[in-house]
Every structure is written in C-alpha cells, then in structure tokens.
Amino acid sequence: MPSVPIPCRSCGSPLVHTFVDLGTSPLCQKHVEPEDANKMEPFYPLHAYVCDKCFLVQLDEFVSPAVIFADGAYAYFSSYSDSWLQHVRSYVELVSERFALGARSHVVELASNDGYLLQWFVQKGIPVLGVEPAANTAKVAQERGIPTVMRFFGTETARDLVAEGKQADLLLGNNVLAHVPGLNDFVAGMKILLKPGGVITMEFPHLQRLMEENQFDTIYHEHFSYFSFVTVEGVFAAHGLTLFDVEELSTHGGSLRIYARHADDLSKPVGERVTELRAREKALGYEDLAIYAGFGERVKETKRKLLTFLIEAKRAGKHIVGYGAPGKGNTLLNYCGVRTDFLDYTVDRSPHKQGRFLPGTRVPILHPDRIAETKPDYVLILPWNLKEEITQQMAHIRSWGGRFVVPIPETMVLP
Ligand SMILES: [Zn+2]
C-alpha cells in the first residue's frame, strides 16, 4: 500500500484494500524493437485496489494516456479479430433499428480507432463523428472518409463539440470507459455531448466474469477501472445519467453493454434486465468487501497451475510456443515469470507486432506460419477469449499431434 493512500477515481475515498497485487510489469502495448533488445524497460507496479465505499476496482495511474498514445508504436488498431468485426457489425444493425437512426441523426464514437465500426453507420447514410486520440489510427479513419477529431475526450472536448453543433443522438464507446484515468471528467463529458433524447451505449469487461473466471491477466496499466454493474450505475447516476438497459455479452471474456440516458428523459423506462442484474450482483455480494478479499489467493493458484504444466511439459522434452501478443498475455507471462525458457516464441497476425518482442519477457513475436514450420507439441493461446476462432484457424497443428492449451480460467489442454 502506498504510504499515502490514493483517492478512488470515482468517489474520492482513500483506497486501502488490495484487490490483487501482480508485482511489477512493463506497459503491455510497448512491444520491444530488435534494436532496443539490449536496453532497459520501465516496469510499474500492477496493484489493483477496491474502494470500500463504491466498490470500484482500479489501478493507480502511473503513465498517462498522453504518454501511452504519444508514439506511433501503439499497435492496437491492426489487431481486430474476425469475431470482433462481426460483433460491431451486428451492433450497428441492432441500435440503428432500435433507436430509429437515420440521415438526420448524429452518431459519435469515443475512441473510434481507425473507423472500423463507424464505417457501417456511414454505409447506412447515418452521419458520424469519431473522437480518437491516437494520431496514426485517426489518420487511417480520415483517409477512409470517417470524420474524426484527434483528441482525448472529456468535458473540454464535449463543450467544444457542442459549440460546433455536434451533439449526439447516439454516443458510444467500446472498451474505452475502463481505459480512461479521468473517469468523472469523461462521464461528465458524455452528459454534455448527449442530446436531450439521446442514448449512450458503452461496452467494457464485466467484473463478475473477471472474478469468477480468474481473468486476472485482463489487469494491465492501460486498463484503469474494472466495473460491476452496481458500481458503473453509481458512476453514471453521479453525473445525471440513468442506465435503462444492459446486455451481457461474451466478448472479451464476458462484457456488459450498458444503455444510458439523461436522468430526466422518462421516455425510456428502466428495463427488467437492469433490475435483474442489479439484484443478482447484490445477492452475490458485490457491495461487500468480503467477495473481493479472496481473489488474490485464487490468482496465485492459477499461476501455480500454469507453471506446473509448463515445468512438467519441458521436463518431458516438449516444445511449447505461444499464440497471440495481446495485452493480457503480457500480464500473464510477466506475473508468472514465463520467458523463452518455456515459450520458444509467440506468433501474431498483426504485421506491426511481428519481428518485435513481448514487453518484459522478451519472447519473440513471429508470423503464424512459423508454427507449421517448427511443429511444436503445445500452443499456448494467450488471447484465450478467442480460443474458438484460433483453434479453427490453426486446426492443422493436430496433423502432427500438436495440442492447444489455455491458461484461463485455469490451465487446460484442449481436447
Ligand atoms: Zn470509490
């Protein structure tokens, strides 16, 4: 615990309760260039706290997003999986119909990346605007004809957009709410940018799934907040926004999609899914510190199981490689101390990652074709949330007797 407790990012209470302490780790998207292989890397504490007042699970901010996005090496934009692209396409169909969006509507996406989602609204003739702080990805979006503002989002950006007449009928953000250190300024900004009858949708990983399925590797420095439904409802309520619907999704190991509106917009009544999920979380104890206290020990056991498998496989003379170079893989490998002593290499479909090394562990990232050349006994799937997709794409490893292994919720060799 720091000598002076940091304040909760939502309610300001001092954070004195550890959720899990994962030691120290480098930033998960800083893949190491070959020419930097002999240089040092900064490591930062990866210590998550839980607030005893609002129960927001959170990390301290060690590196500001301005630094994370500053160099062009932020390689996230090219790594979408096929299943994610399908997911966003069906989202666009769903909300366009449900909220009757058309040529007179205005859709704004926060952290719009290279415009891979907004393009589907554009195709339907629905006017859009992206807000994206990473210059390289924002530029790709603009080249695709997706109007994009290169800025961080918060109250200041929201006021400027309102002044330009750019309020939103639909304001959306996928996997951004958890990634903003200034949570209150971000949500306050959404309140400002939303038209009186407008709708906000946000997707983020669900804390209940993280805890029940030992997804500790989804904790990394760029991911500041971990939300239960009851907590996120409190965050929005504090800014005059009411959650009127919620969906539980399978993406990213289990996510929530929340639907919010202005508190005084009574045209959208609060639905049953909201009352049911709220009641379920309360019954499970998500408003009580006890449930959070047991998590750290389960994480240690998850680590021991992975190491036991890897040690036994290596003693038996097996070759093991990784698949993928996602942020979660870096938390897992750094926390468990798994380097090239266990994994010969990993592979990734993104050409931006190939030829580089994983942060901290320095495992080389190669082209997926390398697996067919070296015929390893085991392929450890680091983005385990995509295991169905990956086992299909890489089904040929079975031709030489290769097997897939997932580390989460616990180490398992797939049949
Ligand atoms: Zn709090």
Image (cartoon, rainbow, N blue to C red):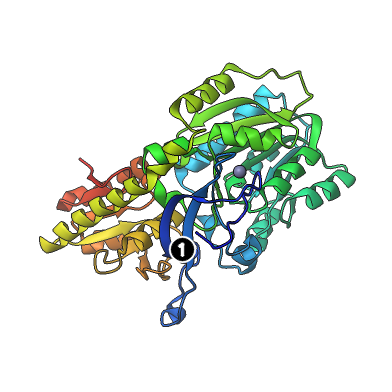
Ligand 1, by image quadrant, is top right
Q: Which residue is the site of mark 1?
A: 351
Taking the image as shown, residue 117 lies to the left or right of residue 319, namely right
Taking 193 as reference, is 378 above or below it?
below
Total number of numbered discs in the rendering: 1
Q: Position of residue 96 (x, y in %)?
A: 67, 28
Q: Which quarter of the figure is the C terminus placed in?
A: top left
Mark 1: secondary structure: loop
Q: Nearer the viewer, residue 203 or 72?
A: 203
Q: Position of residue 369 (x, y in %)?
A: 32, 60
Q: Nearer the viewer, residue 138 or 234?
A: 234
Instruction: Using the rendered image of the protein, determine whether residue 325 is visible from the camera's viewpoint.
Output: no
Instruction: Check mark 1 vs ligand 1: CB closer than 8 Å? yes or no.
Output: no
Q: Position of residue 317 (x, y in %)?
A: 12, 63
Task: For label 1, count other residues whose C-alpha is less than 10 Å away and answer few (under 14), some (14-19) or many (20+).
Answer: some
Q: Nearer the viewer, residue 395 or 188?
A: 188
- The amino acid on which the numbered mark 1 sits, given as a three-letter code, is Pro
Q: Position of residue 276 (x, y in %)?
A: 53, 20
Q: Quadrant of residue 319?
A: bottom left
| Residue found 41% across the figure and 43% down from its top | 293
| Residue found 60% across the figure and 50% down from its top | 14
Instruction: Using the rendered image of the protein, determine whether residue 355 is visible from the camera's viewpoint.
Output: yes
Q: Nearer the viewer, residue 98 or 70?
A: 70
Residue at the extreme left of the image, as rendered: 316
Taking the image as shown, residue 27 lies to the left or right of residue 402, namely right
Residue at the extreme front of the image, as rendered: 3
| Residue found 46% across the figure and 30% down from its top | 285
Taking 18 as reference, is 365 above or below it?
below
Taking the image as shown, residue 380 lies to the left or right of residue 104, namely left
